[in-house]
């Protein structure tokens, strides 16, 4: 298929591009390169450097490359930032997203895979979280993703847009060629590995008084390669009808302390920690039920082991000390 990936130069987007190319799809990475990296776009893909809000640019890219499907990953995605800058989140995640949907309508492209988030559930009442559970975001990031999810439902009904919404839990790890390089970095696993590498003095543990097995937050970490494969499976099924899936590894998840301990074992290095207060907006536990995507698409994680996830991130980081070095 001929696929346009918005955010295709980002952390997860670059891996989706890599996997699409492996499966012999034709790929256009559409990215403004504000957070993405040119060097993260695999050589076989065409990079279009433009804004998501630029409907004319989108229409031109869709037409020129005869695009048949879109994977929409371009977004702002930091919970904390969204609380202080909600306008940015509504503008980039909702308004600019609608420009994409309108460009797709104009060009008669009616297949979409959309990157959503566990943040649409807010502070869940039960674990593991199922797709039909209450949607009650506790921050503008989750709200903006949910607003777009809801728009998709009505675009489907009125304009025959077929979509698959994927609600990611905690993406982590790296492939041989693509890994995580954010500035500033806020995610737990890369921060822990930077501490292990001696590139930061310590990693902070945000909150030790949560009602969990060791007092720290539990998250469901999923290897970025497994996440990428789910997009390709979803794309293959989307003509059969729109759908929504959680994407995580399930089980008991891992606490912050467990992640740090596994990182110590995998790297053989010390990871200095400092315990601090809770970070605003962090739910105690977020663990996915991925039963639906397993049943309907036959997806299951092949790199679900946290050692493997952290090991892959560590080896990528050692090979890319300065990220993508632009
Ligand atoms: N944490 C620390 N210290 C740090 C960084 C994080 O203790 O320096 C903790 C957080 O409090 C949280 C856990 O580690 O409990 C994971 O934090 P991340 O920042 O790595 O990830 P989040 O769970 O906050 O968020 C990620 C994505 C969001 C998405 C969410 C869905 O960044 O976009 O997963 O689960 F919405």
Image (cartoon, grey):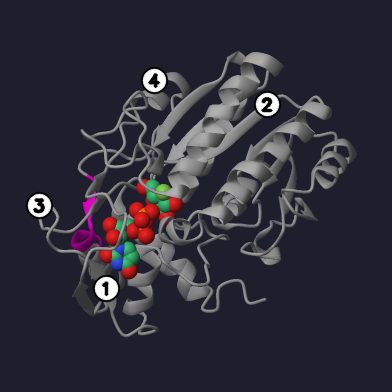
The disc, 2 or 3, on the residue closer to the chain's N-terminal end is 2
Q: For the residues carrying marks 2 and 4, which lies nearer the camera in this image?
A: 2
Name the quadrant containing residue 94. Answer: top right
Q: For the residues carrying marks 1 and 4, which lies nearer the camera in this image?
A: 1
Marks 2 and 3, how far apart at CA: 42 Å
Mark 2 Cα-neighbour bin, 10 Å: few <14, some 14–19, many ≥20: many
Marks 4 and 3, how far apart at CA: 30 Å
- Which element carries disc 4, helix, strand or loop? helix
Q: Which residue is mark 4?
A: 295
Tell me what residue is drawn at x 59 percent, y 27 percent. 152
Marks 3 and 1, how far apart at CA: 19 Å
**Where does residue 279 sit, x and y in percent of width and height?**
29, 63
Q: Are marks 3 and 1 in contact (CB under 8 Å)?
A: no
The disc, 2 or 4, on the residue closer to the chain's N-terminal end is 2
Tell me what residue is drawn at x 41 percent, y 60 percent. 80
Q: Is residue 83 above or below residue 67?
A: below
- Which element carries disc 1, helix, strand or loop? strand
Marks 2 and 4, how far apart at CA: 21 Å
The disc, 2 or 1, on the residue closer to the chain's N-terminal end is 2
Quadrant location, ligand no. 1? bottom left
Q: Which residue is mark 1?
A: 204
Is residue 222 shown to the viewer in this render?
no
Q: For the residues carrying marks 4 and 3, which lies nearer the camera in this image?
A: 3
Tell me what residue is drawn at x 64 percent, y 51 percent. 7
Q: Is residue 132 above or below residue 312?
A: above
Q: Which mark is residue 213?
A: 3
Name the quadrant containing residue 155. Answer: top right
- Which element carries disc 3, helix, strand or loop? loop
Mark 3 Cα-neighbour bin, 10 Å: few <14, some 14–19, many ≥20: few
């Amino acid at each position: 298929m001929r696929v346009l990936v918005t955010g295709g130069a980002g952390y997860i987007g670059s891996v989706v591009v890599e996997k699409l190319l492996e499966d012999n799809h034709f790929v256009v990475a559409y990215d403004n390169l504000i957070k993405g990296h040119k060097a993260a776009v695999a050589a076989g893909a065409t990079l279009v450097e433009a804004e998501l809000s630029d409907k004319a640019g989108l229409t031109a890219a869709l037409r020129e490359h005869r695009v048949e499907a879109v994977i929409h990953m371009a977004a702002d995605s930091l919970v904390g930032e969204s609380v202080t800058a909600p306008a940015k989140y509504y503008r980039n995640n909702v308004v600019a997203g609608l420009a994409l949907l309108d460009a797709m309508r104009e060009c008669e492209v009616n297949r979409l895979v959309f990157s959503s988030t566990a943040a649409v559930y807010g502070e869940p009442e039960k674990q593991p979280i199922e797709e039909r559970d209450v949607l009650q975001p506790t921050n503008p990031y989750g709200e903006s993703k949910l607003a777009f999810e809801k728009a998709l439902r009505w675009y489907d009904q009125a304009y025959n847009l077929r979509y698959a919404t994927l609600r990611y839990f905690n993406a982590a790890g790296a492939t041989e060629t693509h890994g995580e390089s954010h500035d500033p970095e806020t995610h737990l696993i890369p921060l822990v590995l930077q501490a292990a590498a001696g590139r930061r003095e310590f990693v902070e543990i945000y909150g030790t008084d949560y009602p969990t097995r060791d007092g720290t937050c539990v998250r469901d970490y999923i290897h970025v390669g497994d996440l990428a494969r789910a997009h390709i499976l979803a794309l293959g099924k989307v003509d059969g009808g729109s759908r929504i899936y959680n994407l995580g590894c399930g089980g008991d998840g891992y606490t912050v302390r467990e992640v740090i301990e596994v990182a110590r074992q995998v790297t053989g290095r010390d990871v200095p920690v400092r315990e601090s207060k809770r970070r605003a907006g962090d739910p105690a536990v977020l663990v996915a039920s991925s039963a639906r995507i397993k049943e309907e698409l036959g997806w299951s994680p092949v790199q679900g082991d946290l050692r493997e996830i952290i090991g892959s991130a560590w080896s990528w980081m050692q090979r890319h000390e300065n990220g993508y070095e632009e």
